[in-house]
Amino acid sequence: MKFETIVALATPAGIGAIGVIRVSGPETFTIVNRVFKGKDISKAASHTIHFGTIRNGDHIIDEVLVSLFRAPNSFTREDVIEISCHGSNYIIQQLINLLLKEGCQLAKPGEFTQRAFVNGRFDLAQAEAVADLIAAENESMHDAAMSQMRGGFSLEIKQLREKLVHFASMIELELDFSEEDVEFASRDDLKSLIYELKKVIFKLTESFALGNAIKNGIPTVIAGKPNAGKSTLLNALLNEEKAIVSDIPGTTRDVIEDVINVDGIAFRFVDTAGIRTTEDHVEAIGVERTHARMKDASVILYMIDLKSDNLHDLDTQLEYLEELGVPYLLIGNKMDQAQPELKTKLEEHKGLLISASQKENLENLKEALKTLVSLDSFKTGNTVVTNLRHYESLRQTDLALDDVLTGIDNQVTNDFVAMDIRNALHHLGLITGEITTDDLLENIFSKFCIGK
């Protein structure tokens, strides 16, 4: 496949100390050499940096540093040049316009990474991890993206495919000798392999809940009765007045969300309407949304007003939380005004005492949250699925493997068994890009930023 030479700004748009313009393609050195005045870079060695000016005719646009990467030892495995210039929007635009005039094409979103994939730099799952790495806002997201980009997930998928391909080839061979009634692939061995593969796939699909939480933030609902201090707690954790705080019950009528980074773990906190029976139609809708959010949450911080609640109400609330089946942490607020019997009851249930308004014990709350949302499986280096597309492909693979088992048990003909195995291989291949379509690639790389 012949590619045009492309150019784009690789650093964020806006005024900064420097801007980096990336050029990649077969004419990279020829085009840049025509406008760069300094060393003749057409003869310069790869992985060297050169100082000079870029000129439009006799007009100097900027003094720059030019970094050279000769194919195949570059990100795209093409000839690549990165021009480091001053970060003026005017200068950057003038440089890009000049390179376009000299023969470059403006790169589409993700086109550099797409070329790296097409040229065999890495597979599709690793390419997608590049975007995740750029978007990483905490340690967990960074570690997950880095593991995937370095091929940890791809290796597991490759091993699954290799085992299945062997049996597929044996069954295909049997089809060639169908008249001789020979068996190259033991059906018992095939069933054992399918069960082994399904076990690995189950582990990977189960990890998606954790992976999705790592990537998008762990959904953490702050719930409780009106005036328990939910909005005050959210504001205290955020260190800003995000939610309206009032002594009037029912002030919060809709959910308010924000992400907080707790020691490398992103928690997506959701402040909800206070749970109570109300005649106010709008507040009632808010209460319904609170119940819905609690059911979908990964963690619930359930707040008890130690000053105003009573033991009967607390028992009712605990019963409701147990029925939900969502991990929760009891938070006793207004600890300085706590009723002794409520304080004792809360401690019996391993609750945490805080004062949201005074920001007391919030560090203990964060530690308790980290313990409740254990990332041990991730920290020990186990593969974690963070991408919805990968999760769906794994799920479809599992269904195809079920069809293989059903076919073997029902003694269907070899061509049907082979078809189901090919279906499983197809869905595994979609993950790493061994099987692709133009629509799939366009959808994936269009989500990347321009310049990457």
Image (cartoon, rainbow, N blue to C red):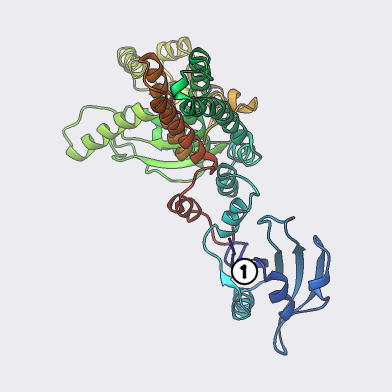
| Image quadrant assignment for residue 111 | bottom right
| Pointer 1 residue | 5
The residue lying toward the viewer, choosing from 292 and 124, is 124
Judged from the image, the secondary structure of the residue bearing numbered disc 1 is loop
The residue lying toward the viewer, choosing from 61 and 246, is 61
Residue 22, horizontal then vertical, whole percent: 65, 65
Characterize the local packing of mark 1: few (<14), some (14-19) or many (20 or more) Cα atoms within 10 angstroms: many
Q: Residue furthest front?
A: 179
- The residue at 60%/58% (across/down) is 112
Amino acid type indicated by mark 1: Thr
| Image quadrant assignment for residue 156 | top right
- Quarter of the picture containing the N terminus is bottom right
Left or right, 338 with respect to 60, comes to left
Can residue 263 be seen at all in this image of the molecule? no
Compared with 97, 347 (above or below) is above
| Image quadrant assignment for residue 33 | bottom right
